[in-house]
Amino acid sequence: MLNAKIVKLINEQINKEFFSAYFYLDIANYYISKNLNGFGNWFNVQAQEERSHAMLFVKYLQNNGEDVELDDIKALKRKFADFSEPLNATLEHEIFVTESINNIYAAALENKDFRTTQFLDWFIKEQGEEEQNADDLIKKYDLFGKDGKGLYLLDSELAARVYAPPSLVI
């Protein structure tokens, strides 16, 4: 059995991951409404990744005989001023998620719950990639996005992204 504090933190993380999927779906809808379907695709794939992350946490609790407690996900009411604003919000959000996972890891270490730290190792690495991807997208937009042809090429590049399920074994 897992420590009650860790179970609580993981249940909170499940909600954060589902919120992340919702957040990215909202951004995908924004870009698609602006006819930037490649950007929309990139964020739709991101939403799929976040749902799969949530399900990995769900399965971890289930495999350890713990109850999964799903919480409400608040509706998003964001309006974006320009094409770069969702990109910056993405990096901020990924930093928030990284902090949350680091807090679970710290609690697991404090409780000598090495099974959970081993499980979280994949997420620690994944969050590094998530932050890097968000930062790279901001930099590409800053370099190319303000020029019509550059924006078109960047949109075309982002249209090629496909979902690849995580290979984590729980």
Image: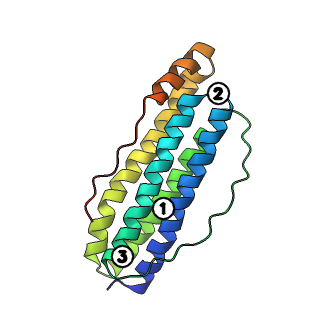
| Residue that numbered label 2 is attached to | 35
Q: Quadrant of the N terminus?
A: bottom left
Percent position of residue 161, x then y: 42, 33
User: Given contact means CB atoms under 8 Å apart, are the residues at marks 2 and 3 in contact?
Assistant: no
Q: Tell me the amino acid under the disc marked 2.
A: Asn
The residue lying at 48 percent from left, 67 percent from top is 13
**Disc with the residue nearer the chain's start (2 vs 3):** 2
Q: Residue 74: name its quadrant.
A: bottom right
Residue ID for mark 1: 99
**Residue furthest toward the top?**
149
Q: Is residue 157 left or right of residue 165?
A: right
145 versus 31 height, above or below: above
Numbered disc 1: secondary structure: helix
Mark nearest the camera among 2 and 1 is 2
Tag 2, which secondary structure? loop
How many residues crowd mark 1 within 10 Å: few (<14), some (14–19), many (20+)? Answer: some
Identify residue for label 3.
62
